Image (cartoon, rainbow, N blue to C red):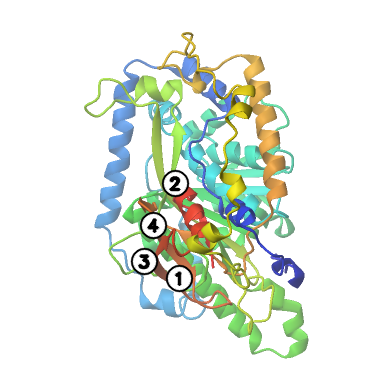
Amino acid sequence: MASLIPETAQKVAFTAETLRSLAKQSDGIHLIPLRLRRAIKRYIREKEQPHMRRSVLRLSESFNKIKQANNQLVTTTSNELIQDSMGKSIDRAQRWKICTSYGDTGLKYRDDETVAYVASRMPSVYSACYRVLKEVRRRLPGFAPTSVVDFGSGTGSAMWAIREVWPHSLKKINFVEPSKSMQRACQSLFQGQKDLPLIHSYDSIQALSKNLQKSDREHDLVIASYVLGEVPSLKDRITVVRQLWDLTRDVLVLVEPGTPQGFNIISRMRSYILWMEKRKCRKFDALDHTCKDLVSTKCGAFVVAPCAHDGACPLAKGGKYCHFVQRLERTSTQRSYKKSKGQQQLRGFEDEKFCYVVLRKGQRPRQVPLSQNPWPLDGMKFDTLKEQLAKRNPEDLVIDYEDLIKHGYGNPVISSCEEEDPVSYASDLTETDALIEVNEESEEEEEEEDGVGQADLGSGWGRIIFSPVRRGKHVTIDVCRSTKSDGSEGAYERMIITKSDNPTLHGQARKSLWGDLWPY
């Protein structure tokens, strides 16, 4: 459950450096961990089949066929389901819960398709999951899941990301994956890994629920990545997400491809869960105070990321759609089996576009009374460019050339002829020393992030939902923000940050990336 942050935590005076560090959520380029690259290489060597490039191409065509078939289906739900899913249509929902099992629809992965998926798609899916879960850790520093449900686990991409983000907390994980070929590939990839949690695999949510006691059905983290798009009807998606929400004790993560269809799925599932929990809270409010104290902590839900509010999505009815991008360095297997489009050589990186939502059970934390605006920039005074120029000390502008020469800055730069091969990539490393180095870097990065602090969940931080446009001395950013202190409503806003009006925020805007936060 969400815990309230003390009121004094919001009253800390922010500086330009702290604002920039708290707003930073995106990664420029992500490098696949060496242990995962080694596991993929080992698996490909064992399972490699002739005409691998053709298999990768067929797999991509299969994904496109599923997307086109789903787009042709009816994407509206009956009024009974939306307006009275807790009432008259409860029998129908229970019938779906029994009859509908994930795996009856979508792509049935054969062995050759599974190998092609591991070689071409697994690093990209892992990078998107890692980017999302890393933000969950930064936004919820006290959250460390011990039990996880991975719905549509496939080859285990989400689990690799979970182990990278929370390397020591995970104790138990339950996979829900109907494809036996995918299950075997997941087991093969994890073979030889150390400190693995307790792993169980199930064919459906129904099989998972039957094998668990009621006290063990709720899990700290439930994640469904790149799977809801393979469920053809909206009714079945709502049923699946409702079951996943019932299995969630704390945090639910949904990730889909960064396409209009993926955004449509995430937006609808987000709206449904928030509506369902609001309806449940209204029922509890009608009870007497004695019962209300017992059940008030069991109702409610709020969005941790990417939305800064729990209201209707301002882009849902517009021509744009909310998605994000994670650049990753391609592994050697991806470069071997993926085909380039009109290029002689495949690029060393690729951009994985994705949509996601992170929902947490409970009420959105409120750090200050609603009569006071809890925006981070409240009370901060920024100097204009003219004021900063007036405060300059003339002595600071004097350049001591003798001091520069003394420290070597005046010496000509000698370029080394022994440069690395331009077509070699960090993803080709195989030495044990490199693995130790990567582990040390990840530990240092974790320590740095833990010391940065937390961008609070009180709706004072907006989200940059498109790439900032930098032109001369002004930056244009598109921000989805909360318009109310309680986070009940939000809006889409285009802002122009100029250097003359606010050089501090202008510098932050120039360094901001697509997906970062923006303070208000």
Write down the residue under mark 4.
474
Q: Is residue 299 visible?
A: yes
Q: How much space separates mark 3 and mark 4, taking CA atoms?
A: 25 Å
Tag 2: residue type? Tyr
Q: Earlier in the sequence, mark 3 or mark 4?
A: 3
Q: Earlier in the sequence, mark 4 or mark 1?
A: 1
Q: Nearer the viewer, residue 415 or 154?
A: 415
56 up-or-down from 277: above or below = above
Which label is found at residue 315? Answer: 3
Which label is found at residue 437? Answer: none
- Label 1 residue SS: helix
| Residue pictured at 35% horizontal, 73% vertical | 78
Q: Residues within 10 Å of mark 1 (few under 14, many from 20)?
A: few
Q: Earlier in the sequence, mark 2 or mark 3?
A: 2
Q: How much space separates mark 4 and mark 1, taking CA atoms?
A: 55 Å
- Label 3 residue SS: loop
Q: Is residue 236 visible?
A: no
Q: Nearer the viewer, mark 2 or mark 4?
A: 4
| Residue pictured at 46% horizontal, 69% vertical | 271
Write down the residue under mark 1.
92
Q: Are marks 2 and 4 in contact (CB under 8 Å)?
A: no
Tag 4: residue type? His
Percent of width and height locating residue 237: 43, 59
Write down the residue under mark 2.
226
Q: Nearer the viewer, mark 4 or mark 1?
A: 4
Q: Report whether 23 appears left or right of 348.
A: right
Tag 3: residue type? Leu
